[in-house]
């Protein structure tokens, strides 16, 4: 798996943006888009004629006139650690160079040099979204990533859907975005266009017949369904189930195909469903595993557990059932957050709800309880959030009584939070709050 310099720069931009967001830092809107290689990671220091040039990062040195991200040493260390972990730069021992060079272009050079080192495995480490619990870090080998891209290409050939361009509305540093919007366009030698604007009008000006639009269900529901037409466009959706209502609305815009990709950060892509089919077709990089809940990766011959119930109506076709890993322990008792959210959602004043473990700092494992985020069933706009907050106290008391009558002590959330929409990450998946 060889990554081009442009792909490495795109990955760096995505990783830096995400890491800053996790720290509550928003890059200034005045920065050029996309960020140039001369972008400084921190305010540039005055030039010193005695500072020797470094062979590790010869490109795009910073200058006082170049744009820069105003971040401190703590944020810079976090960024360097994130980039080193993602690209496995620690294996080549070059990761310290990230702290000695302060431009985007220099970091790209360091990544290229590190991945060329004989000690570098070429692996990449991705983070799960945390939509079902604590985010985890998952390393993937180049051989398995390449096998998945080859399988996707074979699927497109068999379906007569080979694209002319890829239009991406997903971040490159997530596994789905990496495979479909980094590796796939390189493998197919076709252009990639990253969507920086999310309005239907801006997207409509970019799309043209023959394009493959890479997105996720939340984006498609809010933007894709409001486009004037999708004629000649193939839609790929992952990072969550594409609901029948959204799929039907998209289908009314006459796309060439609507593809729902099933997989996870742990496994990568597993199968593709072409709407309106009810079953997913197993990608050619997988075989059914030793049990109904396992799959075998062909290139490694290793079985992998899946987190959902799989039903096999035909040898290479599967149907996705309920999640089988949904239980968590509260006070030593198994509870099911999805079930609890469903019960809370039965209250007429609740429009939506999500429940997860309240893993506050300092709590012993046995003392951890649940928390719930609730969207009240009212059309309160964001600009009137103060009104929503004021009404939340009354709703909180009413819900506490409602919950106590329907859920056991271990199932009852001890913290109720309210807002105009459920907290979601860049792929539309539920996140912690």
Image (spheres, grey):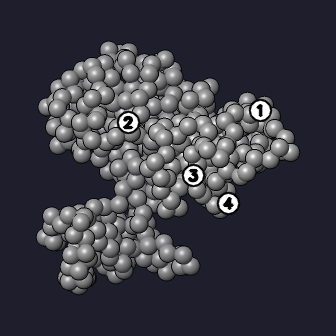
Pinpoint residue 74: horizontal percent, then vertical percent.
65, 62
Question: Looking at the image, is 292 positioned above or below residue 130?
Answer: above
Real-space CA distance between mark 4 and mark 1, rounded to the nearest whole angstrom: 28 Å
* Label 4 crowd (10 A; few <14 / some 14-19 / many >=20): few
Q: Which residue is mark 2?
A: 195
Instruction: Answer with mark 2 or mark 4, whichever residue precedes in sequence.
Output: 4
Q: Which residue is mark 4?
A: 73
Question: Looking at the image, is 218 positioned above or below residue 334?
Answer: above
Name the disc covering residue 69, or none: 3
Name the foreground residue: 279 vs 35: 35
* Label 2 crowd (10 A; few <14 / some 14-19 / many >=20): some
Q: Which residue is mark 1?
A: 117
Pinpoint residue 254: horizontal percent, then vertical percent.
17, 26
Real-space CA distance between mark 1 and mark 2, rounded to the nearest whole angstrom: 33 Å
Q: Which quadrant of the rendered structure holds the C terminus?
A: bottom left
Which-is-in-front pick, marks 1 and 2?
2
Q: Residue at x 22, y 28 (%)?
A: 230
Q: Residue at x 14, y 31 (%)?
A: 252
In screen coordinates, is 25 left or right of 93? left
Name the foreground residue: 77 vs 91: 77
Secondary structure of the residue carrying numbered label 4:
helix
Residue 232 seen from this side = yes
In screen coordinates, is 276 left or right of 309? left
* Label 3 crowd (10 A; few <14 / some 14-19 / many >=20): some
Question: Looking at the image, is 268 positioned above or below residue 322?
Answer: above
Real-space CA distance between mark 3 and mark 4, rounded to the nearest whole angstrom: 12 Å
Secondary structure of the residue carrying numbered label 2:
loop
Real-space CA distance between mark 3 and mark 2, rounded to the nearest whole angstrom: 22 Å
Real-space CA distance between mark 3 and mark 1, rounded to the nearest whole angstrom: 29 Å
Instruction: Answer with mark 3 or mark 2, whichever residue precedes in sequence.
Output: 3
């Amino acid at each position: 798996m060889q990554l081009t310099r442009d792909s490495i720069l795109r990955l760096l931009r995505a990783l830096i943006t995400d890491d800053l967001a996790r720290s509550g830092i928003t890059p200034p809107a005045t920065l050029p888009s996309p960020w140039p290689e001369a972008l400084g990671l921190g305010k540039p220091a005055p030039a010193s004629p005695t500072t020797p040039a470094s062979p590790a990062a010869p490109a795009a040195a910073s200058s006082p006139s170049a744009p820069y991200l105003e971040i401190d040493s703590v944020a810079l260390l976090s960024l360097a650690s994130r980039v080193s972990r993602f690209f496995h730069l620690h294996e080549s021992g070059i990761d310290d160079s990230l702290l000695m060079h302060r431009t985007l272009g220099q970091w790209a050079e360091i990544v290229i040099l590190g991945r060329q080192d004989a000690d570098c495995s070429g692996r990449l480490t991705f983070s799960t979204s945390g939509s079902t619990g604590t985010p985890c870090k998952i390393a993937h080998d180049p051989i398995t990533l390449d096998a998945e891209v080859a399988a996707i290409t074979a699927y497109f050939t068999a379906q007569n859907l080979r694209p002319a361009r890829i239009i991406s509305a997903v971040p490159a540093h997530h596994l789905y975005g990496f495979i479909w919007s980094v590796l796939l366009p390189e493998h197919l030698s076709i252009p990639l266009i990253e969507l920086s604007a999310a309005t239907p009008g801006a997207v409509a000006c970019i799309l043209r017949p023959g394009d493959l639009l890479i997105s996720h269900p939340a984006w498609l529901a809010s933007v894709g369904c409001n486009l004037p037409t999708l004629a000649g466009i193939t839609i790929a959706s992952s990072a969550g189930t594409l609901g029948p209502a959204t799929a039907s609305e998209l289908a009314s815009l006459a796309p060439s195909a609507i593809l729902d990709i099933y997989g996870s950060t742990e496994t990568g892509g597993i199968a593709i469903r072409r709407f309106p089919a009810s079953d997913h077709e197993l990608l050619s990089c997988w075989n059914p595993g030793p049990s109904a809940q396992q799959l075998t990766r062909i290139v490694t011959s290793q079985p992998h557990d899946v987190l959902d119930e799989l039903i096999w109506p035909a040898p290479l076709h599967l149907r996705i059932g309920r999640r089988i890993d949904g239980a968590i322990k509260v006070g030593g008792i198994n509870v099911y957050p999805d079930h609890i959210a469903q019960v809370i959602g039965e209250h007429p004043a609740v429009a939506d709800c999500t429940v997860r473990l309240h893993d506050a700092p300092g709590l012993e494992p046995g003392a951890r309880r649940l928390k719930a985020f609730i969207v009240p069933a009212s059309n309160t706009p964001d600009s009137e959030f103060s009104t929503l907050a004021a009404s939340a106290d009354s709703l909180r008391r009413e819900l506490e009584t409602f919950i106590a009558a329907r859920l056991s002590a271990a199932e009852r959330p001890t913290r109720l939070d309210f807002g105009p929409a459920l907290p979601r990450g860049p792929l539309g998946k539920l996140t912690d709050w």
